[in-house]
Image (spheres, rainbow, N blue to C red):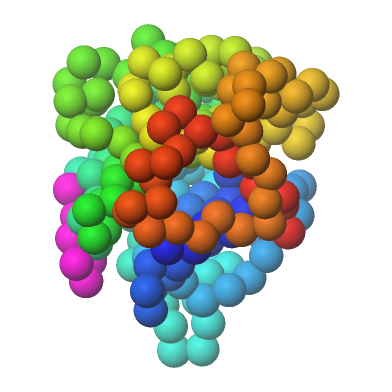
Amino acid sequence: MIVTYYGKQFFKIQLGERTIAYNPIGKDSKEKGSRFGADIVLSSLRHPDFNGADQCAYGDREPFVISGPGEYEVGGIFIKGFGTDTTYAKEKKVNTVFSVMFEGINLCFLGSLASAEALSRDVKEGLGEIDVLFAPISGGDMLSASDAYKLTLALDTKVVIPMDYEHTKGSLETFIKEGGANAETMEKFTFKKKDLDEKEGGVVVLKAI
């Protein structure tokens, strides 16, 4: 599995021959986007910063788009979405927290989660054991760096990847400080299930392309 970060909350997840785009940046966003072909697009929030599925079509490749709560199975990839209340750009919205299960690895994307309390007991149970957590750390209407790391510990995740920190001064530094000696910075995160056992509570900071 290979994880690449494009800034904001935009990730490319390569699962063998299949590709997932998470929260691709739309063409109407003020954020800098990228284009590539994807098989599946996950969009956690209806806003141009996160719903650029049209940027992930390439040639005859039209992605399967998931933009809300529910349970889905696409080519052996099992996806669950859970709705949470949040505020973004001063508007109340529904944020979808996603769990993606593939070959025994559970990825969890928090999206624009407002607070740890926004994850109900039922949602936490539905998410199951999380291997890799993608957490916003910008503060404001989303989790702060400190709260995001506390939630990482509460969810007992093996690895956390911070996101959405580019416009909040000091948030990444605070998050890395919380993670202590377990923090690593890399261009891409390439791993298998067995690699995660060595990273209990680890922080992986990906450089945005």
Compared with 39, 127 (above or below) is above
Q: From this viewpoint, is residue 180 visible? A: yes
* Most common secondary structure along the magenta stretch: strand
Magenta residue check for 184: no
157 sits to left or right of 45: left
Residue at image location 45% in from the left, 28% down from the top: 201
> For the N terminus, which image quadrant?
bottom left
Residue at image location 53% in from the left, 82% down from the top: 58
Compared with 117, 55 (above or below) is below
Q: From this viewpoint, is residue 98 visible? A: no
* Quarter of the rendering containing residue 164: top right
Q: Nearer the viewer, residue 7 or 161?
A: 161
Residue at image location 82% in from the left, 23% down from the top: 169
Residue situated furthest bottom in the rendering? 60
Stretch in magenta: 71-76
Magenta residue check for 74: yes
Compared with 190, 175 (above or below) is above
70 sits to left or right of 172: left
The image shows residue 10 at horizontal and vertical percentages of: 58, 51
* Quarter of the rendering containing residue 8: top right
> For the C terminus, which image quadrant?
bottom right
Q: Nearer the viewer, residue 106 or 6?
A: 106
100 sits to left or right of 76: right
The image shows residue 50 at horizontal and vertical percentages of: 55, 47
The image shows residue 153 at horizontal and vertical percentages of: 42, 18
Tally of numbered discs: 0
The image shows residue 107 at horizontal and vertical percentages of: 36, 45
Residue at image location 26% in from the left, 16% down from the top: 120
